Image: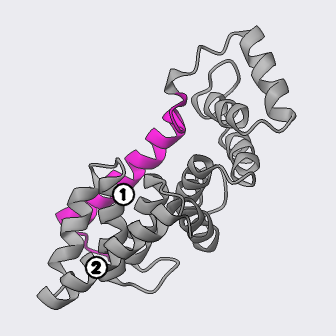
Amino acid sequence: MTIYSAAMINTMTHWRSLALATLLVISGCQTTPPATPSALAVIAQRAQSGDATAQLQLAAFYSRGEGVETNYPESARWLTLAAQQNNAAAQGILATLYYEGIGVPQDYTQAARWARTSAMQGDSTGQSVLGMMYFEGRGYTQNYAEAYAWFALAAVNGDSLEVQNRDRAAEKLSTKALQQAQYRATALAQQISAGT
């Protein structure tokens, strides 16, 4: 029997909430106009023509069941198409879906692939997923310093909930290891900023 601490339950609740919120919002698509039949037809046509923004919108409609029946695998399919076009938001969301197994089989290798790709483009969702993967040792060897660095970046880049995870990772580190993790976060931020 696995015994979970309150912090682990909060983390699991956070990740389930993040995954579901991600499906509902999908990269700012909460501002997408309602899926009227005519709007949906235009967006679907643009998505089928390869427009990554339209693919994200269509993924949002499928995840919310707006104008179409809720269909998480179909949402994941459209996210994959956008992610393959190097859309960082789609990559980060897809990483979350693979991490949680929503609409796709749970696959930490795929989660790591998409999370790292989006994270290196400055996407806070990808950075959050990487932090959690390192913190929990899923898809990567458990490494609290690396988790700290990615959580710190996610917090700076827009995910205020990751401040708590960053601090939890910091509690697992010695003073010296924490300094090294802070240096790593700074180096990663510079690398991302330089686009390398």
Quadrant for residue 130, please give it.
bottom left
| 64 on left or right of 68 | left
Q: Identify residue type, mark 2.
A: Tyr
| 62 on left or right of 129 | right
The reply to whether the magenta stretch includes residue 18 is: yes
Residue at the (35%, 62%) spot, across then down: 153
Using the image as rendered, state which of residue 25 and residue 88 is in the foreground: 88
Residue at the (52%, 56%) spot, across then down: 96
- Give coordinates of residue 27: x percent, y percent: 53, 38
Q: How is the image coloured?
A: one colour
Q: Identify residue type, mark 1.
A: Ala
Residue identified by numbered label 2? 183
Measure the C-alpha gap from mark 1 to mark 2. Answer: 15 Å
Near mark 1 (Cα within 10 A), the count class, few <14, some 14-19 or many ≥20, is: many
Q: Residue furthest front?
A: 194
Between tags 1 and 2, which lies in front? 2
Residue at the (73%, 42%) spot, across then down: 78
- Give coordinates of residue 1: x percent, y percent: 32, 77
- Report how many numbered discs are placed on residues in the image: 2
Going from N to C along the chain, the mark reached first, 1 or 2, is: 1
The residues colored magenta run: 1-29
* Residue 154, numbered label: 1
* Residue 69, numbered label: none
- Give coordinates of residue 60: x percent, y percent: 61, 32
Secondary structure of the residue carrying numbered label 2 = helix
The reply to whether the magenta stretch includes residue 58 is: no
Quadrant for residue 107, please give it.
bottom right
Q: Quadrant of the C terminus?
A: bottom right
